[in-house]
Amino acid sequence: MTTKKYLGSLFITALAVGYSVHLSAQDLDVTTYHAAICQGNGKFHEDRLKVNEAGIANKSSSDAIWVTCPVPARVFESPFTTSYVSLILTTSGEVSRKVTCILDGGDMTGELISQSRTATVSPSDFTDLEWEFPDVGLAVASIRCKLPPSAGIAAFVVGSGAF
């Protein structure tokens, strides 16, 4: 196993251990998911998507790609809604990359939600994009992201409870 792959595996393991515990200070229960459940939006995008133990990344040197990540429903927990979602973004290139993601879904009242977030990811660093729904909560959702070359998603965190 190369050092890079080992560090990626170690990072995902650390995320899972660090985020899957109950955060009593905020009364928010969160779980970390590997980004491998995300998919490219069509063959062009899927062909340029690299999936490994460190997450997913755009392996193209010139083309941006779109990926969609389903937000796992927290239907077996109380409350039965998602009130917090965070994507952990990364880039392996030598320059900073701007990543834009859009959360589309519906809240518990039946209202449709579409919220965009943009972040600049520095080389070999991690940056997160966050969405919070403390009052109503999400019933269903997915996140679409435009990943420039060498940008990727390591994991995402889904939480329920009060802030």
Image (cartoon, rainbow, N blue to C red):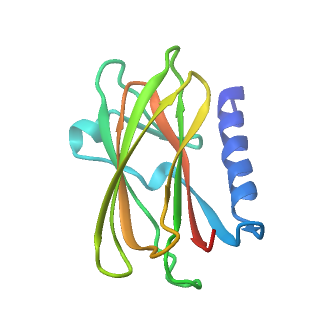
Residue 71 drawn at (x, y percent): 44, 63
Identify which residue, 48 or 25, lies in the foreground.
Answer: 25
The residue lying furthest to the front in this view is 135
Q: Is residue 155 left or right of residue 103?
A: right
Q: Is residue 52 left or right of residue 15?
A: left
Residue 122 picture quarter: top right
What residue lies at 49% left-to-right and 20% top-to-bottom?
A: 96
What residue lies at 35% left-to-right and 24% top-to-bottom?
A: 60
Q: How many marks do you count on the picture?
A: 0
Residue 140 picture quarter: bottom left
What residue lies at 58% left-to-right and 83% top-to-bottom?
A: 77
The residue lying furthest to the top in this view is 94
Q: Quadrant of the C terminus?
A: bottom right
Residue 159 drawn at (x, y percent): 58, 67
Q: Is residue 38 above or below residue 147?
A: below
Q: Is residue 114 above or below residue 154?
A: below
Residue 107 drawn at (x, y percent): 37, 74
Q: Is residue 17 left or right of residue 157?
A: right
Residue 91 drawn at (x, y percent): 52, 28
